[in-house]
Image (cartoon, helix red, strand yellow):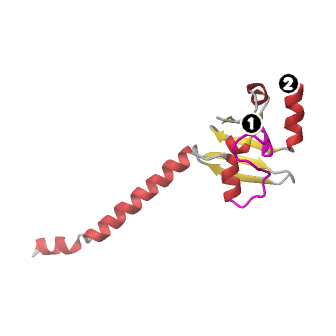
Amino acid sequence: MQCALQLAAAPPAAARASTSGRRQQAAARRAVAARAARVELQDLDGTMHVLEVADDETVLDVALDKGLDMPYDCKMGVCLRCSAKIESGKVEQPGGMISEESQAQGYALMCVAFPKSDCKIRVIPEGELVDAIMEIA
């Protein structure tokens, strides 16, 4: 009799699997959140937005996914439309067309900018980046 009560008290296999699945999903969400950088993004109008950008996402893609109106064109790091200034933090920009010197001065292209830490980024008119590039050259 006692054995039957213990069996009756045990959750059904489907409930155990469901609980296990929820735990795995929660763990996966925590792992992604742990790898995400907090990006404070100031748009051209001066409005500040806070984004969580995973290490495999660009700042531009996350901003567009959130419905923000961001300047961009090619999304390949060539046209300079998505120019930005890194106020703090660090991004990697593989494949972008701006020089290491421009990057060292804090300039970035949001379409190829992968945050490697929490960042404060200010969207700038593309002309500001072009002027900076001309000064460096």
27 relative position to 129: left or right = left
Q: Position of residue 2 (x, y in %)?
A: 12, 72
Say which label, 1 or 2, has the lower sequence index: 1
95 relative position to 28: left or right = right
Numbered marks: total: 2
Answer whether residue 118 is magenta in the image: no
Q: Which quadrant: the C terminus?
A: top right
Q: Which quadrant: the N terminus?
A: bottom left
Residue, far left: 1
Relative depth, front residue between 108 and 27: 108
Identify which residue is drawn at 87% across, 54% down: 45
CA gap between label 1 and label 2 equals: 21 Å
Query: Which quadrant would residue 133 be assigned to in this image?
Result: top right
Amino acid under disc 2: Ile
Answer whether residue 84 is magenta in the image: yes
Which structural element holds mark 1?
strand
Identify which residue is drawn at 31% across, 65% down: 17
Crowd around label 1: few <14 · some 14–19 · many ≥20 (10 Å): some
Q: Where is residue 52 in the image (x, y as percent from the top left)?
A: 64, 51
25 relative position to 124: left or right = left
Q: Point out the frontmost of discs 1 and 2.
A: 2
Q: Where is residue 14 in the image (x, y as percent from the top left)?
A: 29, 70
Relative depth, front residue between 67 and 46: 67
Q: Where is residue 113 in the image (x, y as percent from the top left)?
A: 68, 40
Crowd around label 2: few <14 · some 14–19 · many ≥20 (10 Å): few
* Bounds of the magenta segment: 66-88
Relative depth, front residue between 97 and 12: 97
Which structural element holds mark 2?
helix
Say which mark, if any, is on residue 36: none
* Residue receiving disc 1: 88
* Residue receiving disc 2: 136
Amino acid under disc 1: Ser
